[in-house]
């Protein structure tokens, strides 16, 4: 397993609230939910801190779980219900990481506030001859396998202070055999495909595989600069934090 990534902040006025990290057998990408500057988060740490703290704790939990005995791969797709968490190991890992972060700043911050720091989560773990994945909210995972490219985005909840949000993440397990690569993308890095429609998911993946994640972000910035007033492509932010990670298995 080889992981390469690139990340870039969307505005010089605020820190990059994305986070990306990898360890042998695992990778995570998080997108901190950037609220307007001046919003009272009820937290003295901020969104970038939250994304970083959750990402590091989740990665640690993923690596700790690599000793689990592999099982047969279930069908790809969202779970039938939250009661299946025991069959969805990454959901449990995310719930534990959310609880860890909440415990670390619950005494100093108002975690009940609706604007408490939050983030989307992408996670990937190689477990024997299987690959587990987790997708939350509007970040995107692309799996390049024997049946072509599969795009996975969605889930109604972000990770914040309540571990129960992990129950609604999309999770799955696929065989490692035949899987060429995976692409973990925040929504700032998917704009060429899902917002600007300058290419499709296949073109996006091919660009990253051929030229690297930094090239994707550079192309995205070029397109954004061509529409500085967000007139051609209406969007809430002219530029967004963008992170792309490419995991190759061959």
Image (tube, grey):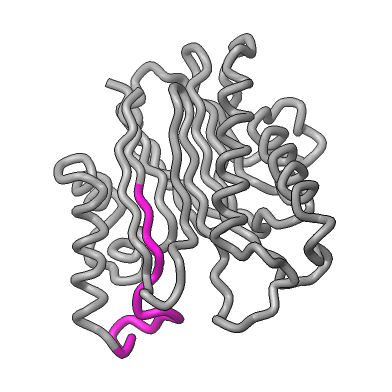
Q: Who is closer to the viewer here, 127 or 206?
A: 127
Q: x, y (%) of residue 249?
A: 32, 23
Q: Which residues are magenta?
A: 229-244
Which residue ends up furthest to the top in the rendered image?
69
What residue sits 33% from the left and 60% below the top? 8
Residue 93 inside the magenta-drawn segment? no
Residue 234: image quadrant is bottom left
What residue sits 45% from the left and 51% below the top? 140
Q: x, y (%) of residue 59?
A: 56, 34
Does residue 146 appear in the picture of this structure?
Answer: no
Quadrant containing the N terminus in the rendered view: top left
Residue 192 against residue 144 in the figure, above or below = below
Residue 176 against residue 194 in the figure, above or below = above
Does residue 8 appear in the picture of this structure?
Answer: yes
Q: x, y (%) of residue 130?
A: 50, 18
Quadrant containing the C terminus in the rendered view: top left
């Amino acid at each position: 397993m080889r992981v390469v990534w690139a990340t870039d902040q969307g505005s010089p006025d605020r820190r990059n609230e994305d986070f990306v990290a990898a360890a042998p057998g695992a990778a995570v990408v998080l997108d901190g939910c950037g609220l307007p500057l001046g919003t009272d988060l009820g937290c003295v740490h901020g969104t970038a801190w939250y994304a970083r703290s959750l990402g590091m704790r989740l990665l640690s939990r993923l690596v700790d779980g690599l000793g689990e005995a592999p099982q047969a791969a279930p069908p790809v797709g969202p779970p039938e219900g939250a009661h299946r968490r025991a069959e969805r190991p990454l959901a449990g890992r995310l719930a534990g990481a959310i609880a860890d972060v909440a415990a670390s700043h619950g005494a100093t911050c108002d975690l009940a506030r609706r604007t408490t720091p939050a983030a989307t989560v992408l996670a990937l773990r190689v477990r024997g001859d299987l690959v587990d994945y987790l997708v939350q909210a509007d970040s995107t995972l692309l799996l390049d396998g024997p049946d072509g490219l599969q795009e996975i985005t969605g889930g109604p909840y972000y990770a914040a202070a309540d571990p129960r949000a992990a129950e609604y993440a999309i999770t799955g397990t696929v065989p490692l055999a035949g899987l060429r690569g995976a692409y973990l993308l925040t929504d700032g890095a998917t704009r060429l495909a899902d917002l600007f429609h300058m290419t499709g998911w296949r073109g996006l993946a091919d660009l990253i595989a051929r030229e690297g994640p930094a090239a994707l972000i550079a192309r995205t910035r070029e397109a954004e600069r061509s529409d500085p007033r967000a007139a051609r492509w209406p969007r809430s932010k002219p530029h967004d934090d963008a992170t792309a990670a490419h995991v190759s298995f061959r």
